[in-house]
Image: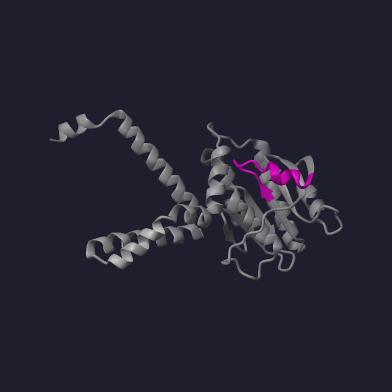
Amino acid sequence: MITKIFNMIRWQDVVDILLVTVILYRVLLIIKGTKAAQMLIGLGVLFLAFVMSKYLGLYTIDWLIQSLWAQIVLAIIILFQPEIRRTLAQMGEARFLPSFTTAEELRSLEEIIKASVALANRKIGALIVIEKDTNLKDFIEMGTQLDARVSRELLLSIFHPTSPIHDGAVIIRGNRVVAAGCFLPLTLSAEISKSFGTRHRAGIGLTEETDAVVIIVSEETGSITTATGGNLQKNVDTTNLRNFLTENFVKPQEAKK
């Protein structure tokens, strides 16, 4: 019996199942910890109610749910708009070959850490964006384009209150500061604390749409906040900041060196 079942399975079926598994896994990773995950649970409950209404003969509920299913595709597009946009952007910018962090880029991460801590100690507000796989060209073009090596001194001078480009975000690609004074999309999430200002909302908003890594320094409290995937980590110290950047940019084998 088992042999017959295996004989009926084609290699195309195996590939098909693997592809669906990978797609579902990636989707779950993207929506993990976001508001979309709660919405997905709600859709699951709605589907369960649909099945139970069929089984128990609850015709009115069954009719209502069937009416809702007719609009479900449009509802999903509206509800999951940020996640769909981020997923498509990541797919379009996906790298098929693994990227390796160079020694120069490792040095740049240390410079970013030193600059962030120095800015926090001086209570100078800052918004530092580090590009990953998703290209941030659209946001770079809205700012003042630069092409300078990342350094503590450069970041401090950019965010100094007397600098003409201290407002907005700095965008870093590899070991280069590619733009400053960039404007980022503000998050519309109602779950974000009202204590956060425009700088924090802009940092979160960008990570909701891209896979960028964001470091935010508050000018009111001097605290450091990190953001990625729409999630915040507040009151980050030097050690936590280094671990955060290492996890996002340094390969395991390189971290051991």
Q: Is residue 184 magenta?
A: no
- Is 34 rendered above or below residue 245? below
* Residue ID at (57%, 35%): 99
Report which quarter residue 98 is drawn in: top right
- Quadrant of the rendered structure where residue 90 is? top right
**Left or right: 10 with respect to 108?**
left
Is there any visible trace of residue 55 in the rendered image? yes
Q: Quadrant of the N terminus?
A: top left
Residue sitting nearer the eye, 160 or 93: 93
Taking the spot 31% from the left edge, 34% from the top edge, the residue there is 14
Extreme left residue here? 1
Res 162 → quadrant:
bottom right
Residue 247 appears in the picture as rendered: no
Residue found 64% across the figure and 70% down from its top: 194
- Judge by depth and name the residue closer to the eye, 52 or 10: 52
Display coloring: one colour
Is 142 within the magenta?
A: yes
127, 14: nearer the viewer: 14
Examine the rendered structure and indicate whether residue 209 appears above or below residue 68: above
Total labels: the figure holds 0
Q: Residue at x 53, y 49 (%)?
A: 84
Q: Quadrant of the C terminus?
A: top right
Q: Position of residue 157 (x, y in %)?
A: 82, 52
* Residue 31 locus on image (x, y percent): 48, 53
Most distant residue in the bottom direction: 195
Residue 16: % across, % down:
35, 35
Q: Nearer the viewer, residue 119 or 76?
A: 76
Question: Where residue 146 sits in the image (x, y, percent)?
Answer: 79, 41
Image: magenta residue range: 129-144
Q: Is residue 253 left or right of residue 193?
A: left
